[in-house]
Image (cartoon, grey):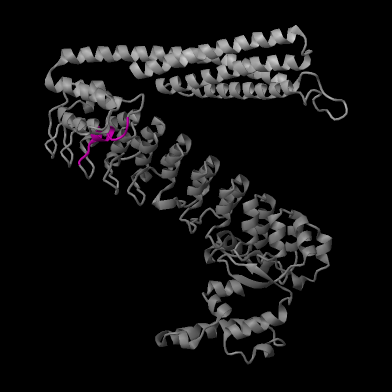
Amino acid sequence: MRTLFISEDLWELVDKGYVEEEIPRDAMRDVRKNDAKALFFIQQAITESIFPQISKATKSKEAWDTLQTKYQSTSLVAAQDGDGSQTDIPVMDDSVYEAAAKGDIDVLKKIPESEFHAQLSPKHNTILHIASEFGKIECVNWILDLPSSSSLLQRPNLNEDTPLHLAARQGHLEVVEALINAAREPTLDIETGPGPHKVMLRMKNKGKDTALHEAVRYRNYGVVMLLIEEDPDFTYGANDSGITPLYMAVEGGFTAAVKLIIEKSSTSPSYNGLMGRTALHAAVICNDIEMTKTILEWKPDLTKEVDKNGWSPLHYAAERGCDPEIVRLLLEKSEKSVAYLRSKDGKKTALHIASFHHHTKIVEKILSHSPGCREQVDDKGNNIFHFAMMKEGDDDFNPSSYFFNYWLRSRGLVNEKNAQGNTPIHLLSLNQILDFRFVWNYKVDKKAYNNEDLTAYDIILRDKEDISEEKDRIQSWLEAVTTGRISSFWEKETKRQEIEQERKEYISQLQKQGETHLIVSALITTVTFAAGFTLPGGYKEDDGQAILSKKAAFRAFVVTDTIAMVSSLCAVFLHFLMTLHKRGKFLEKHLLWAFSLTMVGMGAMAIAFATGLYAVLPHSSGLSVLTCILCSCFFLSIAVEYCKFWRGTISEWMFG
């Protein structure tokens, strides 16, 4: 009955009713008519013995509530609806729920058949829902053999999932097949409309997903094949997210399902997806050559379809740096106009986007197919060279590489001005793109003025606070080519290269010193760590404590050994950090700190050695005194050398 009301758009009247005072006068007639229609359906569906119970009801909701109170289980539980609200529903006995989930038919046989409709879980799942979800095929077949099972087949739960939705989601192929066969009516003429089994296949849940959506989402290939073969002439539309089964299969990389849906569908399957994209958009975004080829062979016109931002599949290939084979397929399977399509956001072509992201292979592919698109500009007048200068250069890309392409050698293109009057070299200067060959190329007009009457050299001079190496190099290049002082430039460049070489050698020396110091620091750490667990004098047998723990010399040993280990361990950590950086100042600072900590560790280790021996040797013995004197001399020599080192370092910092 609920399914009937939903199909006739009457369920809201039956379930919630209406208040006449809240209905506009001009709509009252239609509301009363629809409510009477629903009441008529209820009256026709019940026997004469039950009719007297609702004979006095004037509204459909009154009759429905009366029957619900009388014939549904009085044991209720609060269940949460999809919108967060709470609904009272008849609760299914736990033993019944467990029997359906485990396929225990003996337990289910004890339940009267009339109870099968009243037994509902908190999500309004019937016994057939639960058995289908857990894939209990014997139990499903037993339920389907019952005379009243036909009403359970299309019964939805709170999420409007049928048993077929749950079985398809879990990938239970045998259950799906059993449900479809149970709903089939062989005597029904196909020309009179779809049979009950096809109606069930096409039913949607709250998310507007069919069973095929669920099977594709969870990559259940066998179920997908069965559902397509059962209803090949139906065009499966989009769910509430705007996604069709075909788009979902492409987006999930489910190549086998993509081919199956395209090949087995007798009608053209829907291919829409998110944000107005098509299945071809999704294949390109996934950078999947096989799926792209399959879709293009099926429907090549998809190359011209754009999403809500005006982006074609070629735009996405250009942005993401897809395999050049995908770009070739998109261009060859499309009309020439595809390369000229411009986006809604900025009127950018795929060539502009490829140039911005420095995807030179895609730039070459597009130009070889549609060379005329090189002349297109965006809504701000930027051409392909402008876009190449907008993003900081990659290590393997320089805008000057475009000069090797036949279609990009024109002086007019490389010196074209955008809406602000900036030529590509203005943007090179503004964004500090290090491209020596571009600046020195004879085709580039280095003295072009923009709308502010500034040249590229003027722009690089404006920011006085920027003292970066990139700015200094570009400034020297532009100064040389604009003033003509080539000889002085090469002198500066030679000197700069010498300084750079010296810097690299200095960094290499610092790294080698760090490696040597690391060995010493690690050795001190190892020795002092071991000494901490082999204490002088040993341990007591009864409680495991140190025997000499009350002696002052022993306590001095413990403190100095700890200082030595911690200092050397810190030095090891600093040396480890040095391996992650190559800047000279960073290496200098960390090497000095590591050296200092290693020296502290050495001195503390010497004292620990002396105090440890002093603790275990007789104090009157000359040997213990001699040991202390020798260790003290070593410690003093370390301290003197350490002070000399720091005095020299400070003098170097102060006086150069």
**Please, is residue 568 above or below residue 47 in the view?**
above
Extreme-bottom residue of the structure: 56
Q: Residue at x 37, y 19 (%)?
A: 653
Report the front residue among 237 and 349.
Answer: 349
Is any part of residue 397 visible from this angle?
A: yes
Q: Residue at x 34, y 16 (%)?
A: 655
Q: How far from the left and from the top, in percent, is residue 434?
A: 28, 25
Which quarter of the rendering shows the N terminus?
Answer: bottom right
Q: Which residues are magenta?
A: 381-392
Q: How far from the left and from the top, in percent, is residue 242?
A: 45, 55
User: Which quarter of the figure has residue 24?
Assistant: bottom left
Report the front residue among 339 and 503.
Answer: 503
The answer to whether residue 326 is magenta is: no
Q: How far from the left and from the top, in percent, is residue 361?
A: 34, 28
Is any part of residue 399 visible from this angle?
A: no
Report the front residue among 58 and 257.
Answer: 58
Q: Is residue 649 left or right of residue 480?
A: right
The answer to whether residue 390 is magenta is: yes
User: Which quarter of the figure has residue 522?
Assistant: top right
